[in-house]
């Protein structure tokens, strides 16, 4: 778990509670979910915290949470930035691997040694967590007085985010007295060597220029010219990364921390080649939470006024509303620095902490039970046993796939009406090009196994009961998930009748009505394909795999297959 070092004296000063002793502070911190791990060599608290609350990576963020806990602050606070006087101009030469940038100007900040140490710690902790060790987002903080902006529209000063040749312009990096090119930084500078892997594969390196020259080489190192010290009063904060949302949220956390020091936030205009943004983005989102769900999860009865009070003491704002069904709900406003509130349950967790989890009275469940198999697990086991009895070899395939395997090789068009053609749930940061989506059906996985087993003898009868998913607006998560039964029969005489016969046997064993009306599907032979209709509901497909698909998978024998939703057998 991540840890953060907090000076208890500074925490007392920022919360305005000098009367709090160390023991009392530890208890209050524990109430927020921050566990005391011990003292550092400098006498600071080393606190372990849940990695979702990244706004608590600094003493300023922890102090803000404690002020809400004490009732000294209430509701959502959003700084009012001044109008932009600086512009970041994004050049088309910026590497495609790191195309995004954001920024803000911080004015009149009081940076004593403690404040500067806190800012540096926040920067590095954000790098390690949300920034994925600078790979996803990297922060550069500069002394604004050392920048010279070029002229821009409406009198604003401009800096440029560009791509440069590895052996391009020279600059003096931090912790050095020698001018270096970007490639020399990666080869000869200790920090450059540490982060060289992040950019070494780029044709051009990311770089930020003002009118004087190169002053930042993200995500590796800043230039010495703009180094921040305790004498710095105005700062320029820039962040680059692979995702605009990530760096914008990192920027919000930094802006709120500096605002707590009395600083004024100033907008920065980001000019991309095809659009323009004004940052920081301090817009707020809302979550709808039902009163009944709050009471059910927390196990207590609450008046609406109590819920609103708890929300305000959590740094949120809640407004009573009535749902379409006539139920009491709350429209809860989330502040810009909160990156962890993804679901109504996250709001309820905040309300519970504000109420005090230690104040909740434990009760025994009113239903006694013993452990046992889940109903779905029992169904899966029974179906798997029947499939093995019908001559199938049971498989367990990966749930993740890619669009070529899931659609293209079987000539499926994503989003079409064909079975298995649902829009995929996409992996935002895929580890491999082989696994970029969650599969929408099982047949591609089974065909891949046949493709890899061409050296084995036939017949090959394979089955799987497995997970699949597709986008579904009717679901709370936006993704519909289910488990399917899939099977393939590969042999010199495999045909539609063989697949249907086993499907009929499975249906009889589970006492369901099976119909197989003719249908068309691009992965199957026309006239040898049918829908699987169980108890009047269309739940799958059965047929002979199309010769084009057999050629695609280098199969020299016919393949018959079926697939349907497991729940149809319940």
Image (cartoon, rainbow, N blue to C red):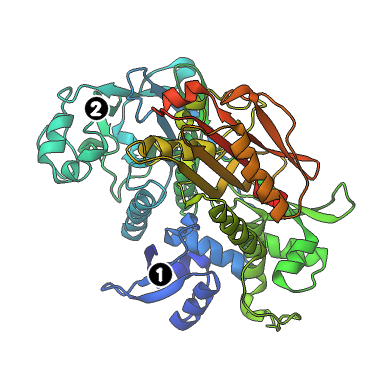
Q: Position of residue 417 (x, y in %)?
A: 67, 26
Image mark for residue 47: 1
Residue that badge 2 annotates? 214
- Left or right, residue 11 beside residue 424: left
Quarter holding residue 425: top right
Label 2 crowd (10 A; few <14 / some 14-19 / many >=20): many
- Look at the image and tell me whether residue 389 can be seen: yes
Seen in the picture, residue 410 relative to 336 is either above or below; the reply is above
Rendered residue at 36%/54% (across/down):
125
Spatial CA distance of label 1 from label 2 is 38 Å
Tell me: residue 360, above or below residue 424: below
Residue 398, given in percent of the width and then of the height, sits at 45, 46
State the SS at label 2: strand
Judged from the image, the secondary structure of the residue bearing numbered disc 1 is strand
On screen, residue 216 above or below 546: below
Q: Position of residue 329 (x, y in %)?
A: 80, 55
In the image, 268 versus 565, the foreground residue is 565
435 w.r.t. 31: above or below: above
């Amino acid at each position: 778990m991540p840890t953060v070092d907090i000076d208890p004296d500074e925490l007392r000063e920022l919360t305005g509670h000098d009367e709090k002793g160390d023991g009392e502070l530890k208890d209050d911190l524990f109430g927020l979910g921050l566990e005391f791990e011990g003292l550092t060599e400098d006498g600071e608290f080393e606190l372990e915290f849940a990695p979702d609350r990244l706004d608590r990576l600094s003493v300023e963020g922890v102090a803000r949470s404690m002020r809400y806990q004490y009732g000294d602050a209430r509701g959502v606070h959003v700084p009012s930035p001044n109008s932009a006087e600086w512009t970041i101009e994004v050049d088309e030469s910026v590497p495609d691997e790191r195309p995004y940038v954001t920024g803000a100007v911080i004015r009149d900040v009081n940076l004593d040694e403690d404040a500067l140490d806190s800012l540096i710690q926040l920067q590095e902790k954000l790098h390690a967590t949300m920034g994925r060790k600078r790979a996803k987002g990297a922060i550069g903080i500069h002394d604004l007085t050392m920048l010279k902006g070029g002229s821009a529209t409406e009198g604003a000063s401009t800096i440029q985010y560009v791509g440069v040749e590895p052996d391009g312009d020279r600059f003096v990096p931090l912790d050095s007295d020698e001018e270096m090119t970007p490639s020399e930084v990666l080869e000869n500078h200790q920090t450059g060597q540490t982060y060289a892997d992040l950019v070494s594969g780029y044709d051009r390196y990311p770089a930020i220029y003002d009118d004087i020259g190169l002053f930042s080489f993200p995500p590796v190192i800043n230039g010495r010219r703009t180094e921040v010290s305790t004498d710095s009063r105005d700062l320029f904060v820039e962040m680059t990364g692979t995702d605009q949302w990530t760096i914008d949220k990192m920027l919000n956390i930094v802006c709120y921390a500096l605002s707590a020091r009395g600083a004024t936030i100033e907008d920065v205009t980001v000019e991309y080649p095809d659009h323009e943004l004004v940052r920081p983005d301090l817009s707020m989102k809302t979550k709808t939470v039902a009163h009944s769900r709050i009471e059910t999860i927390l196990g207590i009865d609450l008046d609406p006024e109590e819920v609103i009070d708890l929300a305000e003491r959590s740094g949120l704002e809640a407004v009573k509303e009535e749902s379409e069904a006539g139920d009491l709900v709350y429209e809860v406003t989330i502040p810009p620095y909160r990156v962890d509130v993804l679901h109504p349950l996250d709001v309820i967790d905040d309300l519970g902490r504000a109420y005090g989890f230690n104040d909740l009275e434990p009760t025994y469940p009113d239903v006694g039970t013993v452990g046992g198999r889940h109903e779905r697990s029992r169904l899966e086991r029974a179906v798997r046993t029947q499939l093995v009895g019908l001559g199938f070899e049971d498989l367990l395939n990966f749930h993740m796939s890619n669009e070529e395997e899931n659609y293209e090789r079987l000539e499926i068009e994503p989003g079409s009406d064909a079975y298995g053609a649902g829009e995929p749930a996409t992996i935002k940061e895929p580890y491999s090009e082989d696994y970029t989506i969650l599969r929408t059906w099982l047949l591609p996985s089974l065909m891949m196994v046949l493709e890899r087993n061409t050296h084995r003898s036939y017949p090959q009868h394979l089955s799987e009961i497995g997970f699949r998913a597709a986008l579904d607006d009717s679901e709370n998560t936006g993704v519909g998930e289910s488990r399917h039964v899939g099977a393939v029969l590969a042999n010199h005489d495999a045909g539609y009748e063989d697949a249907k016969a086993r499907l009929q046997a499975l249906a009889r064993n589970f006492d369901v009505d099976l119909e197989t009306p003719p249908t068309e599907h691009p992965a199957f032979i026309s006239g040898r394909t049918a829908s699987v209709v169980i108890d009047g509901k269309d739940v799958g497909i059965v047929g002979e795999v199309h010769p084009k698909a057999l050629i695609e998978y280098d199969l020299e024998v016919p393949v018959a297959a079926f697939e349907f939703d497991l729940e149809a057998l319940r």
